Image: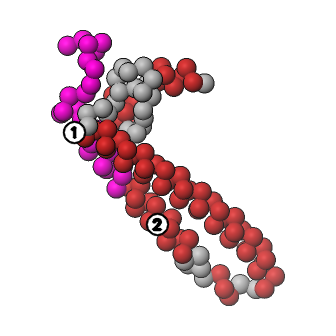
Amino acid sequence: MDNHEKTRYSDIELQEFKEIILEKLQIAREELSALTQSLSNPNVNGTDDTAGTYKTLEDGSATLEKEQINQLAARQKKFIENLEAALVRVENKTYGICRETGKLIQKERLRAVPHATLSMEAKLRQN
């Protein structure tokens, strides 16, 4: 079957993508929970016994670290939402269809970026 006639991925292909997405989701959720934990236990490194002179320095870097962790956590949440949205598209069989061109997004791209909603062609046009 020629690629141009194909308007959607087959159920077998969708199942393969679903497994990729579920795997990535599991990893992403674990990473998010690790990030959240490190935010709630900032003193895991036990820096309390350090001399007072370094205290202000450490507070500053701890704040910076906290901000970075917060940013990472926010990015991770967004990633999880995108993956969950991709799962919905798998279920209603619209997964892998470019929202700009209506063509199928290449499998290689979907394997690398399973939550992609744009084909490379459409993405390049945006730039």
User: Magenta includes 23?
Assistant: yes
Question: Element at badge 1?
Answer: helix
Residue 118, located in which quarter of the rendered image? Answer: top left
Image vertical order of residue 112 relative to residue 80, above or below:
above
What residue lies at 22% left-to-right and 32% top-to-bottom? 13
Q: Nearer the viewer, residue 27 or 4?
A: 4
36 vs 93, left or right, is right
| Residue on which disc 1 sits | 15
The N terminus lies in quadrant: top left
Q: Is tag 1's residue or tag 2's residue first in the polypeptide sequence?
A: 1
- Look at 51% across and 65% down and name the residue there: 35
Of the residues shown, which amino acid type is indicated by label 2?
Ala
Q: Residue at x 71, y 84 (%)?
A: 50
Identify the amino acid type marked 1: Gln
The residue under the point 54% across, 22% down is 124
Q: CA distance from mark 1 to mark 2?
A: 29 Å
| Magenta span of residues | 1-26
> Residue most toward the right?
53
Q: Are marks 1 and 2 in contact (CB under 8 Å)?
A: no
The residue at which mark 2 appears reads as 34
* Farthest bottom residue in view: 49
